[in-house]
Image: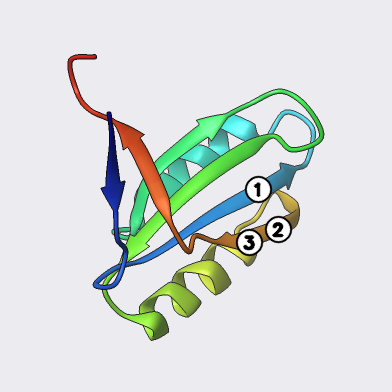
């Protein structure tokens, strides 16, 4: 059975990031230091990174997205605001 996660107390966003060629690791190191970044993954495909942001304040989410967008080595971003999540129960 899936666990429902109601995000009423948290703002949750996923950012898809295209970096300059060869800059993925450098960008990940910088972005991972931001307190609201929950996870940062290097991926294959159209985008180079997938970043998960969690914060309790809408303004902090906005600031974090803006900070990431200004990071040297980033070409473009797309930000997805999560409105509902479900995850598998641990151990299954």
Left or right for 45, reference 63 = right
- Which disc number belongs to residue 78? 2
Instruction: Decide which of 43, 19 is in the foreground and name it.
Output: 43
Percent x, y of residue 9? 24, 72
Give the quadrant of the N terminus.
top left
Left or right for 89, reference 87 = left
Question: Residue at label 1?
Answer: 16
Percent x, y of residue 13? 49, 60
Residue at the spot 22% in from the left edge and 28% down from the top edge: 89
- Which disc number belongs to residue 79? 3
Residue at the spot 81% in from the left edge and 35% down from the top edge: 46
Percent x, y of residue 87? 34, 36
Give the quadrant of the C terminus.
top left
Cα distance between the residues tagged 2 and 3: 4 Å
Residue at the spot 29% in from the left edge and 60% down from the top edge: 6
Cα distance between the residues tagged 2 and 1: 5 Å
Residue at the spot 37% in from the left edge and 78% down from the top edge: 60
Cα distance between the residues tagged 1 and 3: 6 Å
Crowd band around label 3 with a 10 angstrom C-alpha radius: few (<14), some (14–19), many (20+): some
Secondary structure at numbered mark 1: strand
Q: Is residue 72 above or below residue 43?
A: below
Secondary structure at numbered mark 2: strand
- Colour scheme in use: rainbow
Instruction: Decide which of 80, 87 is in the foreground and name it.
Output: 87
Whether label 2 touches label 3, CB < 8 Å: yes
Q: Is residue 57 above or below residue 44?
A: below
| Dot 2 or dot 1, earlier in sequence | 1
Secondary structure at numbered mark 3: strand
């Amino acid at each position: 059975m899936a666990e429902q996660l109601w995000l009423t107390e948290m703002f949750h966003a996923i950012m898809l990031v295209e970096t300059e060629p060869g800059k993925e690791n450098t960008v990940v190191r910088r972005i991972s230091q931001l307190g609201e970044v929950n996870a940062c993954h290097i991926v294959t495909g159209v985008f180079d990174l997938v970043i998960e942001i969690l914060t309790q304040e809408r303004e902090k989410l906005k600031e974090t997205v803006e900070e990431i967008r200004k990071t040297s080595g980033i070409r473009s971003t797309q930000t997805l605001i999560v409105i509902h999540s479900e995850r598998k129960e641990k151990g299954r």
